Amino acid sequence: MNRTINAAVYETHGNPADVLNIETQPWPTPASDEAVVQMRAAPINPADLNQIEGKYPVRSQLPATPGFEGAGVVVDLGKSVKSLTVGALVILPHNLGTWRDAVSVKASELVTVPSEIDPVHAAMLKINPMTAWRLLHDYVDLETGDWLIQNAANSAAGRAVIQIAHDLGYKTVNVVRREELVDELRAEGGDVVLVDGENLREEVKNATNSAAIRLGLNAVGGDSALRLANCLAPGSTVVTFGAMSLRPLKIPNGLLIFKDLRFRGIWINKWYNNATMDERMEAFRQLFEMAKRGLLKTKVEKAYPLSEAKTAVAHAAQGKRSGKIIFEFGA
């Protein structure tokens, strides 16, 4: 086994392609309660780029290795670890920095993944599919046949919402910005897919037979979020989990007075911090069951080796991609 690893490191905040460098570091040695995980795959999420830029609520001590998400294989165990075996595929905790060849981590913080699930897909279950699962379970009690509406439906979280909702028997109105996404999202299980615009409310009414929609999922903010809120039934809930437009959500008084809408937010890091290990594992069990059936596969546009980190983060920062940019590590 080679005795060094490569790791992506930034020493100052700034444009990721400028401040990110690859460093050689010693091969990790596990403490007695730790496991060494050799990375297989790690995605580049917007939160990763924001953290490198210094625009994220969580700031690591510098110099830091980015990467909130990833999966790898256990290759070494500390002497007191009984809960894991060498060779197990695991999902890593979110406070660690996954953009490196291998890392030592507390065994109790690792989530073991069923062997039927591909490491690339396992690497991307923790943030977007888990956010989607929480969005559909924690805010409105939905029943079979109930409708929900979401913007940014072609995002990784949006696609996970479509697949999970479809699996649970809920119906989705999916709002996108590009006409060419309509058929694609319908094929993934989206009941209604509409291009965002001034007539959204009428189009939603027509497409759903004026169904009462009680849950709105907002990842965009600005005017898009307002159009979403206008499609909802009185007493409904809007949950915001992203701000792609970088525009604030401005709520007219009438939506509060006459429609009594509720506006909530979710940050999945906070959910992980507050959830017990049992609560986390219960949710992961459900996601794993779906993943085994071929669902929740996050689309990948391109995989890069870690040595091309600068090119990879520049690619990930571009809009209108067809899927995630990820790092893949040699087996």
Image: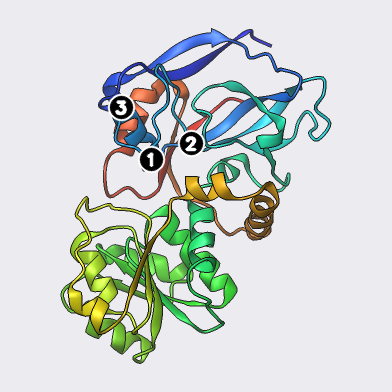
Residue located farthest toward the front when viewing the structure as drawn:
257
226 left or right of 163?
A: left
The disc labelled 1 sits on which kind of residue? Answer: Ala
Q: Nearer the viewer, mark 1 or mark 3?
A: 1
Q: Is 4 situated above or below 278?
A: above
Q: Residues within 10 Å of mark 2 (few under 14, many from 20)?
A: many
Q: Which quadrant would the C terminus be assigned to in this image?
A: top right
**Which residue does the numbered mark 3 point to in the structure image?**
16
What kind of element bears circle 1? helix
Report the disc number at residue 68: 2
The secondary element bearing badge 2 is classed as loop
Which residue in the protein does label 1 denote?
Answer: 47
Kind of residue at badge 2: Phe
Picture coordinates of residue 324 (x, y %)? 41, 44
State how far apart marks 3 and 2 are (Cα): 15 Å
Residue 34, percent from left and from top = 71, 24
Q: Which sits in the foreground, 271 or 291?
A: 271
Decide which of tag 1 and tag 2 comes sooner along the chain. Answer: 1
